[in-house]
Amino acid sequence: MIPTLRRWLPEVVALVALTIYPLLPLSPTLGAQLGNIFIFAILALGLNVVVGQTGLLHLGIAAFFGIGAYIIGILTASPTYPFKFDFLIALAVATAGSALVGLLLGAPVLRLRGDYLALVTLGFGEVVRFTLRNLEEITNGTRGLGPIPPPAFTRWIGLDLDWSQDFRPFYFLNLLFLALVVVVLRNLERSKLGRAWTAIREDELAATCMGINAARTKLAAFAVGAAVAGMAGGLYATSLGSTAQPDAYDFNRSIMMLCCIILGGLGSIRGTLVGVLILVGFDNILAPVLDSLVQRADLPDSPLLEFSNWRLMIFGLALILMMRFRPEGLLPTARMRHELHDEAAPSAAKGAA
């Protein structure tokens, strides 16, 4: 019991702190931005299953993010479509539909590795984006689908929440789903399937010789990652009130999530959450605050003084420094930390001798 409590202690403390935050008289704008960060944390966790735990370089996770969002839009958006599904049912369909697309993508590319797999998934992401843009009869083209109504399941228990004016309903909804995803993935990581993912990442040939079915294991990783990304897309579209335009699910979104898991630590759930908080938090929270401070200081109007224009350079510099001084990430898994440092120690000792 004590080891289990110690293992979950950081997550429990963070969950309690994030639950208390909306009850304090603090900025509602910051609360709304945190709600969006929860969604991107779910998306990054889906990518971490494929890249971090299984070792498959995936550059098209934003495509499944968009697929989940558009499935929610088709099933709930009014007056575009007549379906009017309940939010929970639509979210379940979006999650399952994204997982199915993940299986369809994974099946033909099982034999590909490294750069070849990365190119295929990158191309898949671009194909999905342009498909969403060009199928105007279904996706409404560049305008997206909307309006998407807020969830109505709270009325079942007698709660009539103001989803449009108060940030807290979506905040708690996104936090709840993030907590559920973390619990599921933490348990899945310690399951037989999770250990098979790790074995495939470390040495696919050795794992196959030990009786692991590499094809099924990779397909499961693709399906789980796509399902989690589709769930994040459904939450994103519901929180936004529309699917947004297809360019919201472009290659830059996939790269941002990849940077988050590299910064936090490949394969580490805690590291992924910290990476999202740092990168997405800088992009959505800190950069606008710094820009507003510069404007209030009456400094010369110059693009060089806008922090949002420097974000890509800052992200790139952070990744370079991480690869140079801490390649395992900020919060790596115990396995990754031991592999890197235990290998470096004998080398240093041999050089000293």
Image: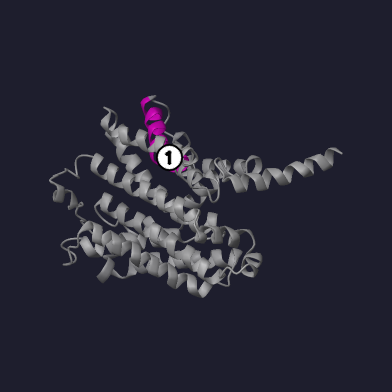
Q: Kindly indicate the quadrant of the structure image that contains residue 71.
A: bottom left
The disc labelled 1 sits on which kind of residue?
Answer: Glu
Segment colored magenta: 277-296
Magenta residue check for 292:
yes
| Quarter of the image where one finds residue 350 | top right
| Residue 144 appears in view | no
**Is residue 319 within the magenta segment?**
no
The picture places residue 83, in percent across and down from the top left corner, at 18, 66
Label 1: which secondary element: helix
Q: Residue at x 83, y 41 (%)?
A: 351
In this view, the residue in front, 176 or 196, is 196
Residue that badge 1 annotates? 11
Q: Position of residue 264 (x, y in %)?
A: 52, 44
Query: Who's the residue at 87% across and 39% down the image?
Result: 353
Q: Is residue 44 visible?
A: yes
Residue drawn at (55%, 45%), measured in percent from left and top? Answer: 316
Q: Is residue 352 left or right of residue 245?
A: right
Name the residue at the front extreme: 1
Q: Residue furthest bottom?
A: 108
Q: Quadrant of the N terminus?
A: top left
Residue 6 point in image, percent of width and height: 48, 37
The location of residue 41, given as percent across then percent down, is 41, 47
Front-most of 174 and 127? Answer: 174
Picture layout, residue 260 above or below residue 141: above
- Using residue 66 as the reference point, say whether residue 215 is left or right of it: right
Q: Magenta span: helix, strand or loop, mainly?
A: helix
